[in-house]
């Protein structure tokens, strides 16, 4: 070959190499351009909810295609949020506790359908009869609570569980779905007992390390060594302020206290949506993922169900697997469309603010769906008269955690809760649309027993039993 031919081949080879090297850069640029508007959507929701800042990440297939920080991590320093910053999740923690417990069952170290007393000795008889299935699916009959402050030592979890008595129940196990954080405290203690080490260490060894979630931890003293978004609260009309001291209660860690980043959470999501594989390795067993995302309990009042640590629904023909989280100072949303291998992760640094609207819009953009395609469908209206619901009038409670009341007076229906009385309108089959004073109406679902008699009112994810 002459010199000219060699020169042409060299130029062609250099050009091909350059194109290959530039392809990832171009892909990243195109992805950033495609989702640039999402940051504006997030800023608007931050403003409306008075949340200082948020981190977000989008997953498509087996890759993070977009991540960003919006707003500030701390209103006092005005330091910007970065995607590598830790937030405390709230209840999205539950999918990780469920993963650990189901994986232990998959190894044959316990049964999901056998009483936990056969695995953990020394529990009160009322607690010992519960099964992991009931705990993970919120069908254990436990009343809900979420104390943010408590003991700081590793023994706190076991001490809290062993102190539980029959008074923790508001109804019989398996009677009704009712979201209850204490069920996940117990589930986490079962993980601790079977693994033979403190819950936080068991989770690190069995879940976070294998997945490469290098910054995720339950321990505040470890979290503070990484970039950390401070937790905030905004009371009344006041501007958001940093919560001091930061809330922590080791006895409640398994239900909602994981520190993590959108980058670490993306690794769990990628493995979950790719049959347990990430970085070419099998990390989660497909059977474990299947159990987590199988419906185990119908959620009253709609078309959603609960798996283990995950809410399962279908909107716009898309199967969604998701969970939200709220705790002192923080909120979170993780939403996946496993069949399309697409997911959105949102973390906010104000109590209860997980930017759910931004998460839904992010999923619509990923799936190339029209805006509002994934909004929660409204219930159909009904012509049922208030008088026909007279049998439902009365008080409903979870025991010591307060009560709610349905009132029928002069043909008008209302509900009372926390000293407030609100107008209620029959809507759909055994549903009430409750006036929320300017906000979107709340839906209360009426649940009869097997004989058709009034038994429970379901609202805000929790069931309340009718008083005798």
Image: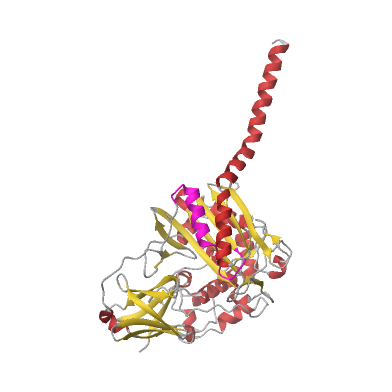
Task: Judge by depth and name the residue closer to the eye, 299 or 241.
Answer: 241
Task: Judge by depth and name the residue closer to the eye, 292 or 123.
Answer: 292
Q: Is residue 70 visible?
A: yes
Percent of width and height locating residue 293: 45, 59
Q: Is residue 283 visible?
A: no
| Quadrant of image for the N terminus | top right
Task: Judge by depth and name the residue closer to the eye, 429 or 107.
Answer: 429
Range of residues picked out in magenta: 348-370
Image: 390 above or below 375:
below
Q: Is residue 412 left or right of residue 149?
A: left
Percent of width and height locating residue 353: 56, 67
Assess whether residue 353 is covered by the magenta stretch.
Answer: yes
Image: 108 above or below 369:
below
Percent of width and height locating residue 434: 39, 75
Q: Is residue 127 left or right of residue 147?
A: left
Q: Is residue 415 left or right of residue 52?
A: left
């Amino acid at each position: 070959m002459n010199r000219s031919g060699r020169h042409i081949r060299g130029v062609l080879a250099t050009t091909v190499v350059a194109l290959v090297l530039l392809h990832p850069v171009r892909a990243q640029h195109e992805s950033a351009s495609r989702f640039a508007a999402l940051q504006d959507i997030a800023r608007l929701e931050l403003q409306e909810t008075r949340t200082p800042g948020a981190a977000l990440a989008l997953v498509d297939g087996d890759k993070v295609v977009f991540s960003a920080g919006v707003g500030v991590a701390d209103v006092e320093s005005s330091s910007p949020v970065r995607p590598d910053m830790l937030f405390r999740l709230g209840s999205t923690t539950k999918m990780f506790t469920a993963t650990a417990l189901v994986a232990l069952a998959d190894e044959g170290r316990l049964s999901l359908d056998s009483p936990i007393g056969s695995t953990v000795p020394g529990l009160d008889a009322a607690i010992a009869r519960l099964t992991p299935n009931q705990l993970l699916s919120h069908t254990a009959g436990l009343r809900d609570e979420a104390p943010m402050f408590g003991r700081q030592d590793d023994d706190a979890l076991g001490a809290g569980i062993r102190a539980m008595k029959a008074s923790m129940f508001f109804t019989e196990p398996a009677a009704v779905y009712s979201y209850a954080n204490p069920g996940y405290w117990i589930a986490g203690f079962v993980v601790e007992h079977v693994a033979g080490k403190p819950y936080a260490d068991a989770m690190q060894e069995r879940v976070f390390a294998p997945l490469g979630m290098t910054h995720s931890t339950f321990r505040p003293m470890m979290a503070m060594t990484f970039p950390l978004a401070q937790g905030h609260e905004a009371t009344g009309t006041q501007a958001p302020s940093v919560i001091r001291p930061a809330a922590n209660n080791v006895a409640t860690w398994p239900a909602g206290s994981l520190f993590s980043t959108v980058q670490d959470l993306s690794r769990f999501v990628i493995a979950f949506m790719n049959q347990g594989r990430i970085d070419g390795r099998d990390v989660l067993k497909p059977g474990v993922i299947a159990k987590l995302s199988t419906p185990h309990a119908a959620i009253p009042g709609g078309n959603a169900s609960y798996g283990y640590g995950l809410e399962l629904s279908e909107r716009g023909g898309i199967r969604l697997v998701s969970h939200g989280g709220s705790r002192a100072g923080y909120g979170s949303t993780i939403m996946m469309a496993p069949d399309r291998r697409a997911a959105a992760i949102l973390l906010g640094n104000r109590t209860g603010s997980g930017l759910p609207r931004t998460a839904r819009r992010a999923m619509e953009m990923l799936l190339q769906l029209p805006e509002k395609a994934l909004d929660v469908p409204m219930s159909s209206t009904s012509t049922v008269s208030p008088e026909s619901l007279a049998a439902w009038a009365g008080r409903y409670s979870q025991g010591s955690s307060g009560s709610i009341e349905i009132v029928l007076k002069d043909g008008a229906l209302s509900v009372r809760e926390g000293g407030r009385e609100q107008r209620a309108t029959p809507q759909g089959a055994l549903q009430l649309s409750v006036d929320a004073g300017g906000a979107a109406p709340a839906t209360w679902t009426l649940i009869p027993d097997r004989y058709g008699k009034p038994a429970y009112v379901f609202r805000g994810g929790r069931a309340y039993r009718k008083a005798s």
